[in-house]
Image: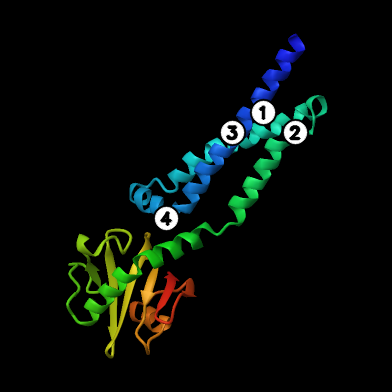
């Protein structure tokens, strides 16, 4: 009787470990998928990357718990390797899945129409720089939606009739930023950077007129 109760208790621990692992993994995967949204919320408060600490701690605890369950393999069977195997698979998934690329794709295509409307208005001089400390910034109001991170400002640079418009995906400190750049038909990312004296770190072509850039 006592042996059966011990076995039931052990199976209960196994189920609890697997359930906790799945839940903590799901939370951490969501935190990674929406990483840059959380960055925009927490970075100005100096709490970056708070969301990963909060979501990651339970997963680490569950992963350690799953490794502890391996001690039951000899007595109760190979099924006790399941939590450890799930932990390893979850780690590989989190380490290899391109969450940032997924989020950027979603962000770009979801707001493309609104951003192209803004680009058209800028080219027609219906939207002009309106930020006191910069002649290149335009602060957009809420009618355009959330098309640019960090306050809905955009960067506008011009040369010889060519207009460049950048929508932020991240606004850091010390001139660090990234975003979606719309270039004119005969323009280039390099010319945009020269106009602002930016040191480019990344350039990814999305369409003929759109690039993802980071500085």
Does label 4 or label 2 sit earlier along the sequence? 4
Give me the C-alpha separation between circle 3 and circle 4. 28 Å
Residue plotted at (39% across, 70% down): 180
The C terminus, quarter of image? bottom left
Disc marking residue 19: 3
Q: Residues within 10 Å of mark 4 (few under 14, many from 20)?
A: many
Residue for badge 1:
14
Find out whether the residues at labels 2 and 3 contact each other: C-beta distance under 8 Å.
Answer: no
Residue for badge 4:
36
In the rendered image, residue 16, in percent from the top left (x then y), is placed at: 61, 28
Does label 1 or label 4 sit earlier along the sequence? 1
46 horizontally vs 143: left or right: right
Give me the C-alpha separation between circle 4 and circle 2. 38 Å
Residue plotted at (31% across, 58% down): 150
Residue for badge 2:
79
Find out whether the residues at labels 1 and 4 contact each other: C-beta distance under 8 Å.
Answer: no
Q: Which secondary structure, mark 3?
A: helix
């Amino acid at each position: 009787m006592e042996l059966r109760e011990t076995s039931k208790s052990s199976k209960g621990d196994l189920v609890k470990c697997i359930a906790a692992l799945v839940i903590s993994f799901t939370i951490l995967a969501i935190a990674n998928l929406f990483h840059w949204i959380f960055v925009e919320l927490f970075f100005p408060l100096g709490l970056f990357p708070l969301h990963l600490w909060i979501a990651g701690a339970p997963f680490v605890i569950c992963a350690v718990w799953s490794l502890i369950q391996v001690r039951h393999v000899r007595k109760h069977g190979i099924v006790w390797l399941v939590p450890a195997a799930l932990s390893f698979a979850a780690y590989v998934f989190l380490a290899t899945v391109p969450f940032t690329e997924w989020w950027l794709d979603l962000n770009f295509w979801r707001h493309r129409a609104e951003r192209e409307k803004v680009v058209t208005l800028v080219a027609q001089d219906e939207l002009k720089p309106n930020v006191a400390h910069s002649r290149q910034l335009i602060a957009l109001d809420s009618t355009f939606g959330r098309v640019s991170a960090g306050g809905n400002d955009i960067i506008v640079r011009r040369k010889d009739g060519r207009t460049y418009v950048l929508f932020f995906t991240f606004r850091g400190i010390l001139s660090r930023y990234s975003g979606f750049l719309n270039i004119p038909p005969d323009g280039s990312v390099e010319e945009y950077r020269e106009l602002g004296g930016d040191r480019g770190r990344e350039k990814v072509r999305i369409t003929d007129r759109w690039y993802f850039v980071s500085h």
